[in-house]
Image: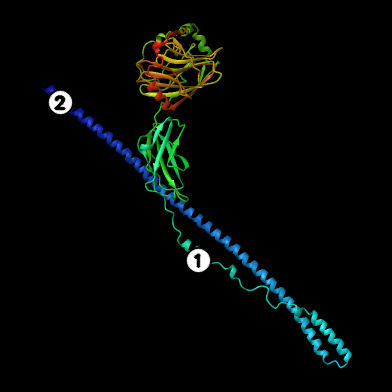
Amino acid sequence: MALFLLTGDGFLVSQQKEALQRIISTLAHKNDEIQNFIETLNHTLKGVQANASSVIGELDEEFDGLYSILDEMKESMTSSIKQAESYKTQELQNQLSQCSKALENSEELLEFATRSLDIKDTEDFSKAARQIKDRVTMASAFRLSLKPKVSDNMTHLMVDFSQERQMLQALKFLPVPRAPEIVLADCLVADNSVTISWQMPEEDNKIDHYVLEYRKTNFDGLPRIKDERCWESIDYVKGTEYTLSGLRFDSKYMNFRVRACNKAVAGDYSDPVTLETKALVFNLDGSSSHLNLKVEDSYVEWDSTGGKGQENKIKGKENKGRSGTPSPKRSSVSSRSPLIRGSRDRFTGESYTVLGDTAIESGQHYWEVKAQKDCKSYSVGVAYKNLGKFDQLGKTNTSWCVHINNWLQTTFAAKHNNKAKVLDVVVPDRIGVYCDFDGGQLSFYNASSKQLLYTFKTKFTQPLLPGFMVWCGGLTVTTGLQVPTAVKTLQKSENGLSGSASSLTNVAQ
């Protein structure tokens, strides 16, 4: 009875601990959300202050520009008035000068004519009268136009700004576009591309374009202010849909937001959305690769100068490596966790091999490999992490691969358990590797055309590591890729059409 009570009490305490743990987890999650929201509010507050100052500065620039235009117009119009004044003044002064001279000559002739009336001698009087007549005929006073050439009227240079004044008085802020709404149901993530679709809450014919922003993140939910990556922007999007292509999915998620812009101002951002963009990302494990291989992240290259001393030390073991027999130290199935850097021996002998640094334990995955044009020999496939350091890809029952040999003549074969099946297809420039761990399928594709090259069918019993062998050349591995849609479609219809591990008939000696 006491034991029952003790057991009952222990069970009750266990339940209470589980309940308390759930409460702690919920509180921690809520605290994290509140902290993120506080950071968002602080960021928004700083944004309000900064944007207000920016808008005031832009307003000053606009009015300064307007004042500058008015000053230029005033200067131009003033110059026109002064030019008209100068022209009219010159014309009137010329007329005044001509009239003054004509008047002076006319007064002189009048005085001469008046004196001539007092001449007594008939002959002298007749002579004077003829002179006066001739001079009158030629007098400039009788050829003058007694009308001003120009008027003093300047009304044609007057301006009326009443209409413009009304327009300026009616000047007001341009309506800010409302925030768009991202239509999550119309967004699509496929083939390392993301299509984002949005709509306006109400029609706005003054919208000129949209600005789409995105960033990669490993956090689900709303964007975090202190996220490790900055927003990237795509400006002048004319439609309400945009596709980002050729992405490398090296994060679990991507945040998106969009805002509308008219000719003068941009509106608020839409509520951000977070889309899942998971894909297999791995590098090559240079710490355990063969010493004759030079490894940098996703690139491996044959280096004939590496590992000379190491090869001499193990010279006596090379025959065992050539035979494909697993090393006794690595023949048993390892029960340890997936491989991490530095957790295994280096490949040696003729096993010019390097493995990926990330294990595949479930799901469907895809990566691509491109060889240098002058690469003499290389293999692409997968292996269990207990692959022996003398073992070669495809020559054990724990590895699967396709092998390309360009020495003397090109051969292309699928290999597993020291058996090979010659593939009667052209070797592609890039090979796509599709691994369905749960479904027990490993398929190889022409990465460009998505032509199926070969499929292994088996049951994977341990975590898999991407594996690569290279001799006299180099390989570039591209990861962060989704399983292409074309590959998914081919996999559904491929059943019964491809080879399997059990169908390998040509033994590779």
Q: Secondary structure at mark 1?
A: helix
Tell me whether circle 1 and circle 2 mark residues in contact (CB < 8 Å): no
Quadrant containing the N terminus is top left
What's the residue type where badge 2 is placed?
A: Gly
Please tell me the numbered disc located at residue 8: 2
What's the residue type where badge 1 is placed?
A: Ser
Asked if 342 appears above or below 247 in the picture, the reply is above
Total marks drawn?
Answer: 2
Asked if 400 appears above or below 259 in the picture, the reply is above
Of the pair 161 and 391, the residue shown nearer to us: 161
Residue 269 can be seen in this image: yes
On the rendered structure, is 179 left or right of 264? Answer: left
Q: Secondary structure at mark 2?
A: helix
Return the residue at label 1: 162
Name the spot of residue 483 as percent of width and height, x first: 41, 26
Of the pair 466 and 51, the residue shown nearer to us: 466
Asked if 356 appears above or below 61 in the picture, the reply is above
> Is the residue marked by circle 2 packed among few (<14), some (14-19), or many (20+) residues within 10 Å?
few
Q: Mark 1 or 2, which is nearer the eye? A: 1
Residue 345 can be seen in this image: no
Please tell me the numbered disc located at residue 211: none
Residue visible at 80% across and 79% down in the picture:
138
Name the spot of residue 487 as percent of width and height, x first: 42, 24
